[in-house]
Image: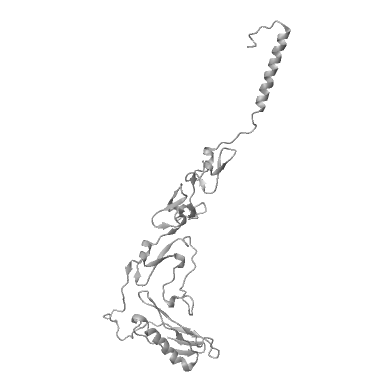
């Protein structure tokens, strides 16, 4: 070391000073090469599915994260789709059914990003119910929004020649989520697994008061048109009849007429068309009609 050396002349002293200065200059040069910023290093380099921020935390791409909390981590796990939860805890406002991964009715596969739904649930994010036994192959699985009020024409919402049954606007939380079976004709029960048997009035049944007249089902059809300007004259229409086993039968075309002279013929045509339905689904019917200033009344 320089401390162990004994210098005898002024020349050697100058040499010591010169060497010391050189070391200071070299040390200064080395220090100046150190960068003035630190390079961030994230876990697993964010697995190639995110960007590494300056604080060594990954900013994951969409649908990537880690674990149930979906914190960034190393962005190695997929995030499954979200839908309205079937059951959850309320928020601070007391509101239920917020968004949840797999709607709270499935487990997320972190490898594929797809929900493995529990029994009875299906679809994206397990967002809808399955119908019991897939309606047993004898019906269709319909959303609660699309279910109609009964099935007969007396329950139809539009008065006229229409096949649109009565429906209601539905905006509850399970809209487009809850489903049920609509069974094919001759099938019934919640899963459409039971065959229906024909049924009717018990012939051995008696009335408590035999003096009271029998009551028959009466349906009224109203055909409205102007007698002086009947736009439907000569046009045809058909009637549909739904049996007690949900079978639907359609009559042959019936010609429309608007004059009082043709009223009896028109009523007779309606009666024959109904009696001629297949399988004698209507084995007895009486049709009567009357003319009102606003149009025909056919009973």
Q: Which quadrant of the figure contains the N terminus?
A: top right
Q: Position of residue 153 (x, y in %)?
A: 43, 77
Q: Position of residue 293 (x, y in %)?
A: 51, 89
- Decide if residue 281 is in sight here: no
Q: Is residue 251 above or below residue 106?
A: below
Quadrant (top left/top right/bottom left/bottom right) for the C terminus: bottom left
- Quick one: which residue is furthest to the left in this view? 204
> Which residue is found at the position 68% from the left and 24% from the top?
29
Q: Give the colour scheme shown.
A: one colour
The reply to whether residue 108 is visible in this rendering is yes
Res 144 quadrant in image = bottom left
Work out which residue is located at the far top of the displayed protein and give it. Answer: 8
Q: Which residue is nearer to you in this view: 205 or 63? A: 63
x 38%, y 62%: residue: 134
Horizontal arrangement in the rendering, residue 43 relative to residue 119 (left or right): right
Relative to 13, does residue 52 appear above or below in the rendering? below
Image coordinates of residue 280 in percent, x first then y, are 34, 82
Question: 104 or 18, which is in the foreground?
Answer: 18
At 35% from the left and 70% from the top, the residue drawn is 187
Percent x, y of residue 89: 46, 52
> In this orientation, which residue lies closer to the viewer: 32 or 193?
32
The tally of labels here is 0
Looking at the image, residue 205 sits to the left or right of residue 70; the answer is left
Which residue shows up at 51% across the image and 46% down it? 64
- Nearest the camera: 286 or 37? 37
């Amino acid at each position: 070391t320089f401390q162990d050396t004994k210098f005898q002349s002024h020349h050697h002293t100058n040499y010591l000073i010169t060497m010391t200065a050189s070391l200071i200059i070299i040390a200064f040069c080395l220090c100046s090469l150190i960068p003035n910023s630190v390079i961030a290093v994230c876990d697993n380099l964010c697995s190639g599915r995110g960007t590494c921020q300056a604080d060594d935390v990954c900013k994951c791409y969409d649908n990537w994260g880690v674990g149930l909390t979906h914190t960034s981590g190393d962005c190695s796990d997929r995030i499954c789709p979200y839908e309205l939860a079937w059951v959850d805890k309320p928020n601070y406002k007391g509101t239920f059914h917020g968004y949840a991964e797999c709607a709270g009715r499935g487990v997320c596969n972190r490898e594929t990003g797809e929900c493995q739904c529990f029994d009875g649930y299906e679809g994206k994010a397990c967002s809808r119910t399955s119908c019991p036994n897939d309606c047993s192959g004898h019906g269709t699985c319909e959303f609660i929004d699309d279910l109609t009020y009964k099935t007969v024409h007396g329950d139809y919402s539009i008065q006229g020649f229409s096949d649109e049954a009565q429906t209601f606007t539905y905006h509850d939380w399970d809209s487009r989520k809850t489903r049920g079976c609509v069974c094919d004709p001759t099938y019934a029960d919640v899963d459409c697994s039971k065959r229906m048997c024909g049924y009717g009035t018990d012939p051995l049944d008696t009335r408590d008061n035999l003096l009271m007249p029998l009551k028959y089902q009466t349906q009224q059809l109203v055909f409205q048109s102007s007698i002086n300007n009947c736009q439907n004259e000569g046009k045809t229409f058909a009637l549909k009849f739904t049996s007690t086993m949900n079978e639907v039968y359609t009559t042959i075309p019936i010609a429309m007429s608007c004059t009082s002279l043709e009223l009896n013929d028109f009523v007779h045509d309606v009666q024959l068309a109904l009696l001629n339905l297949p399988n004698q689904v209507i084995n007895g019917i009486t049709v009567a009609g009357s003319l009102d200033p606003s149009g025909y009344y056919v009973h």
